[in-house]
Image (tube, helix red, strand yellow):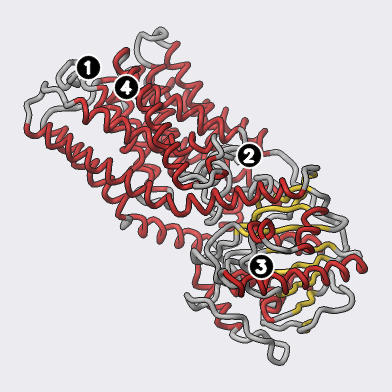
Amino acid sequence: MTRRGSSWAGLVVTLVAFLGLTLAAATATPAAAGSEDARPLVVVGIPGLTWSDVRDGDLPHVTGLADRGSLGSLTVRAVRSTSCATDGWLTLSSGRRAADALAGCRDPGPVVGGTVPLWEEFVAAARGAGYGARPGTLGTAVAAAGGCVATVGPGAAIGGADASGRVAHHSEALPDRFDCVITLIDGEVLPTEGPARTTVLARADDLVGRVVAVADASGADVVVAGLGDGVSPVRPRAVVAAGPSFPAGLLSSASTRQPGVAQLQDLTATALARAGAGTEGVTGRVLTASADGSPVAERVADRVGFEERAATLRSVSPQVTGWLAAGFALWCLAVAVVWWRREAGTPLPRGLVVAGVAVASVPVATFVANLVPWWRSGAPAAAFVALLLGVVALVGGAALLAERRRHLGGLLVVAVVTLLVLGGDVLLGSRLQLGSVFGQNPTVGGRFYGFGNTSFALYGVAVLAVVAALAAPGRFGRWGGPALGLGVLVAALGLEALPSLGADFGGPPGLLLGGLLVLATATGLRLTVVRVVLAALGSVALVAGVAVLDWLRPAGSRTHLGAFVETVVTGGADEVVGRKVAQNLANLGSPPLLAMTVAALVLVTVAWRTGRGPSAPGGVVLRGAAVMALVGFAVNDSGLVIPAFVAAVLAPLLVAAGARSGADRVSGR
């Protein structure tokens, strides 16, 4: 190996080793202490319950419970977009996403001979869903730990049955005392709206009052939860926990890392921990309570705002995505037509350039918009759209001004804004991304923190643009620029990969390889087979090291990275990989993503045929981003999400920059 080859090998090894040491230090955190409190835990499930019901309705007992307890917003997504009551109880039973075999909702049936009806159908449906759910996990594990699960009502029987579908302590009436360590109570499914909903809410509130009275006499903790959507529109559901273990404040868990936000599987983990059973087989984490002395009305109003934000974004996200895809596709085709019909050197119409920069500014603008609490307005959807357009105008205008002053200045402006917004958001807890158009949707509950696939695509392009700008030949000396670029790449990879921050499994390999390509080009290093293989092995080692380090932590502190390693160790990797491959294939047929990808390919083809490639600095970023997008496409379950959004941001900004030689400068008209 040549001296330069040895230097390159040393660079890769040093980079991976440095990241490994950083990750080891950052992941060596103890698990959150599990509850050793043996007092009974009572869970009242009311599918469809929201904080809007508490704010708007006459629910004195639920409000009183919230006043003295910890409250939160509950993600109840199971297998399908809407979680029926049966789905909610099955998910509680499994500690993983599970659902009824039927697509439509059917009410839980009464227990017959101590056995839950249709149990075998539930088990078969869970087996085929691909989430590794095993109905009966809660009941079986509590019994194995020497405790018992008491159930009241048909839905509760589904949640508390053992693996064979049997319930040993079941009744249809509320007992006078809670003797089992876990008691599950079915509080009815709320109708959609109107007088019928009001009537059922009143009955549910009366039930909560009677449960609290018995719980206080028994020294038990009480959790009231909207255990599924039932027949109501999809929303984050209300959850409140009160008793000796839960002070007035907010609920959270290690699975969400968000104050005031939990997911349904966390109730399973909490019940298992309360019974002294292990939580390794479930995807939830034990609920924790943080003290908050705010009046209950303020805490409820905050949860109602979160609910409104999630519901609004659920309705506007498809529209924003569709309009972005249509705008980008039309822009690509318009530019391709101009290039095809005009000779090289003919400037693009100014309107096309402005439109392209506006399109490229939309994705990051959707996150910036969440800095303003638009969901508190009387018309949240209209407020969000107006705010989004305003942010696009600001970011796009700044990018256009910067491009006039400096080649690729527009790309750098969008890149710096993206790094500040997304990188800063991850450092501060991912509050902007949770409940955003292109971030984490709390009604879906795929993840609640760190980088998702779309935000990674935006973040990755931004990192590569900044690294390329710093490492450009002659800007900071022969080695000063590449050293600065390497430092940014290392920091960005740490932010992306650390389980305590970005917690991204599929992003770091592509970002590492794309960043190394940018640095190699900047230093004039020739790519060889050995160097490429070395870089690829380094990226694999990085991802594997992060996942294994996360797995070495206690189960209660692991993220999905360590959970995947645990799945591999226990032999369930085929289910996870199969589900992710199916998701990847399904996303290939997404009309918006397909339109964006095809349009980008058309633009690239026309640019190649007409000799309109980017300038040399733009080409460096383009090659690195192409590698990142292809690797991201290959190792993630997002299908075309990463390539499509890389193209949507990068292509318009490179076209706006034009060729440095003047072959395709933008006209001033």
Report the Cα–Cα distance between label 2 and label 4. 36 Å
Which is more N-terminal, label 4 or label 1?
4
Q: Mark 2 — residue?
A: 500
Q: Residue at x 85, y 79 (%)?
A: 175
Indicate which label's residue lies in the foreground, 1 or 4: 4
The earlier-in-sequence mark between 2 and 4 is: 4
Q: Is residue 545 visible?
A: no
Mark 3 vs mark 1, CA separation in Å: 60 Å
Residue holding disc 4: 400
Question: Which mark is nearer the camera, 2 or 4?
Answer: 4
Q: Amino acid at mark 3?
A: Leu
Decide if residue 155 is on the left or right side of residue 541.
right
| Residue in the foreground of this view, choosing between 117 and 246 | 246
Q: Quadrant of residue 44?
A: bottom right
Q: CA distance from mark 2 to mark 1?
A: 42 Å
Is label 3 or label 2 in front? 3
The x and y percentages for residue 218 are: 91, 68
The residue that disc 3 covers is 92
Image location of residue 422, percent across then percent down: 51, 33
Instruction: Say which label, 3 or 4, has the lower sequence index.
Output: 3
Q: Quadrant of residue 266?
A: bottom right
SS for dot 1: loop
Question: Residue at 29% of width from left, 24% of height from top?
Answer: 618
The image position of residue 379, as x and y in percent, is: 49, 47
Q: Amino acid at mark 1?
A: Arg
Q: In the picture provided, is 62 more to the left or to the right than 435? A: right
User: Disc 1 marks which residue?
Assistant: 660
Q: Is residue 360 above or below residue 380?
A: above
Q: Are marks 2 and 1 in contact (CB under 8 Å)?
A: no
Cα–Cα span, label 1 and label 4: 16 Å
First in sequence, mark 3 or 1: give its number.
3
